[in-house]
Amino acid sequence: MHFDASDTLHWVECILSIQVIISSLEIIKIEDILKDEGLLSWRIHRLNHPKVALFIKKIRLDFLFRFQMTRIVIVIRILMAFMISIFVIINFSVLMPLLFIFFSTIFLTLRNPQSNDGSDQMASIVIYSCTLAECVTAGYGKEIAIYFIVAQSSLAYATSGFLKLTKKGWQNGDYVPEILKTSSFGNLRLLAYIEKKNLLPLFWGVVWLTGTV
Amino acid sequence: MKAYDIFLSAFFLIWFILSVMSQLKNKFILKMRSFDCLHLIPNWRFFAPIPAKKDYHLEYRLKLGESNTTRWERIELVAQRNFWSMFWYPSKRLRKAFNTSVRRIKRRLSDSGFDSASRSVSYLHLLNYLQNSVLINNAKALQFRIISQQDFAKNRKPRLVFTSDWHIQ
């Protein structure tokens, strides 16, 4: 299949910039948890990887992980994500803002990984791949990066779908109402509706869809 | 093909092979993942194979005197979801951070016992948060516990997951 690698990569980067803006704004909205007294205190979290924390201190970057600096990094990250979209539109190289997002992603992964979910992990993989691809000017490296992103996306949904197929609770539809009963992922109205009607074929559809996409 | 292209191809190929092996719960990869502080090796699950079917809640009580303890108070960490939550729900990160701490405490508890769990970083996260967010004017000590239940179930049946030691203020 033929496609223009540069154009495709630019589309991916535009979608990526939206994800970066939303996820960064989410962290800003609940920024209190990043404070020393919050749930994601760096003072405590650095004990998870003492060697990494020691290395960060040794190279004198520990100040970056404090609350105020983390906030500044996130704000600049949002600006850089906007710049990516603008640069794509005016056909200017996105390498500079992408590099900042690349390093800030590494920083945020070290700083507060507990609050990240699967979508953040997928975004990180796309950020690393796009940055590596943008470092080459020729199309071939970009093509490889796109194939890699496609392969990772397929792997993500295929794994999830196939693992669901192995469990009886997914096959007979038991798990869906159980998930809906939680306030973390559920919805009271949807739960009431599902408990009234038999939606087993729909659940199977979800399993097959995630397994075959 | 330039040298950089060959390097890039090899790099992406190795990364993808490691990602596939990670889904198969390969022992070598599982060990490698404990060093993967940049989260480069993914573990794609998305509610599979067994989805999360419980809500976790954080509760605390204070010791005011020798035999005077307050009732258990629940900390409402996260706002309830509404229609707009599918587009904008920052609290999900707060919930994820809390749930991750709970999962790690539970794992340590079952693998190595209470002492190990109460020395874990996740335990310290919860304790640090409570000691700084709860009004403890006259309190001599603080204790917390983790409760699991299905918030929207008709029969909620709260279950005790973990109770901490008393911590002197």
Image: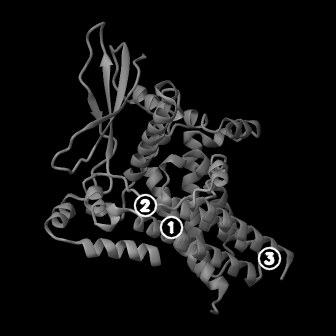
Does the CB distance between marks 3 and 2 fall below 8 Å?
A: no
In which image quadrant can residue B56 be found? top left
Residue B71: percent from the left, percent from the top? 23, 23
B143 vs A189: above or below = above
- Give the quarter of the figure containing the C terminus of chain B: top left
In percent of the image, x 53 and y 63: which residue is there?
A: A20
**In the rendered structure, which amino acid carries the disc numbered 3?**
Asp
Q: Are marks 3 and 1 in contact (CB under 8 Å)?
A: no
Q: Please name whichever residue, A8 or B11, is drawn nearer the observer in this view of the structure.
A: B11
Q: Is residue A118 visible?
A: yes
Q: Amino acid at mark 1?
A: Thr
Q: Earlier in the sequence, mark 3 or mark 2?
A: 3
Residue B58 sits above or below residue A120 on the image? above
Q: Which residue is mark 3?
A: B5
Secondary structure type for disc 2:
loop
- Residue type, label 2: Ala
